[in-house]
Image (cartoon, rainbow, N blue to C red):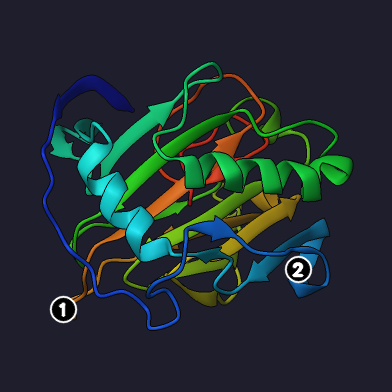
Amino acid sequence: MRLDVGYAVRMSVSVQESLLDVGEEPSPGALGGSVQRTPLAHGAWVDLRRGWLAGSGAVFGRLVAAVPWRAEKRHMYDKVVAVPRLLCFYGEDAALPDPALTAARQALNAHYGPELGEPFRTAGLCLYRDGRDSVAWHGDTIGRGRTEDTMVAIVSLGTPRPLLLRPRGDRQTGRRGGSSLRFELGHGDLLVMGGSCQRTWEHAVPKTSQPVGPRIRSACSSGPAGSANVACSSESYSDFIL
């Protein structure tokens, strides 16, 4: 349960840009044959396109400065705890905070629209400040995603962090999920989870004790507004990852 409690946070962080990013005008690259699709069990799949958003380091810096980041709290058992990341959500009619994100969403709609059957409309951003920030195992099953196939498109900016994917277990029977897949995402990488992935698999960004820099994830949605984080989704979702 997430509390309707939050406060604005001013951020001033820096990140070492990929050498491939230096001097490039921020823009999304080609999709099509450059996207690598991996079929998963139970009708799920994952698409991966490395370095899709050129100039992602510059976009990262602009978003850190321009986005009205919020810190939130939630109930966990008998305590109220801080959500370990900063958030911002953009509804269906809201302008995105950077033209590179607008261009990225347009490119995603052009490529995935025929398969998805609708456009991405809403967006959420999530800032992982260091290795202490994370997101626990979950699937984005808000609204239609609970029973139907959806897409979540994630663009990662800044320091690479692992995104883990594993088959869902069954809490009622005690059956555990399978072993996890690991994707190191950063510097403009695009990852799209599709098919039944949100219902039959779950994903996480784990904490790490290693010294790591900040990272932004961004997400788009075609459904009504939901919770916020960073990724693109065809449902109300907690991540708009750009």
The x, y position of residue 159, in whole percent, is 31, 71
Instruction: Give the quadrant of residue 176.
Output: bottom right
Please give left or right for residue 238 compared with residue 192 in the image. left
The local crowd at label 2, few if under 14, some if 14 to 19, many if 20 or more residues have their Cα within 10 Å, is some
Label 2: which residue?
Answer: 40
Amino acid found under the numbered disc labelled 1:
Pro
User: Which residue shows up at 61% across the image and 33% down it?
Assistant: 221
| Distance in Å between CA atoms under marks 2 and 1 | 32 Å
Above or below, 21 relative to 157: below
Q: Nearer the viewer, residue 122 or 26?
A: 26
Element type at marker 1? loop
Above or below, 82 relative to 214: above
The x, y position of residue 94, in whole percent, is 47, 20
User: Which residue shows up at 16% across the image and 32% down it?
Assistant: 78
The tag on residue 174 is none
Above or below, 152 relative to 205: above
Instruction: Give the number of marks.
Output: 2
Q: Nearer the viewer, residue 202 or 194?
A: 194
Label 1: which residue?
Answer: 211
The local crowd at label 1, few if under 14, some if 14 to 19, many if 20 or more residues have their Cα within 10 Å, is few
The x, y position of residue 235, in whole percent, is 64, 32
Element type at marker 2? loop
Q: Nearer the viewer, residue 212 or 15?
A: 15
User: Which residue shows up at 59% across the image and 19% down it?
Assistant: 224
Amino acid found under the numbered disc labelled 2:
Leu
User: Which residue shows up at 23% across the image and 31% down it?
Assistant: 68
Q: Nearer the viewer, residue 75 or 129?
A: 129
Please give left or right for residue 104 compared with residue 227 in the image. right
Q: Along the polypeptide, which appears first: circle 2 or circle 1?
A: 2
Quarter that holds the N terminus: top left
Please give left or right for residue 194 compared with residue 63 in the image. right
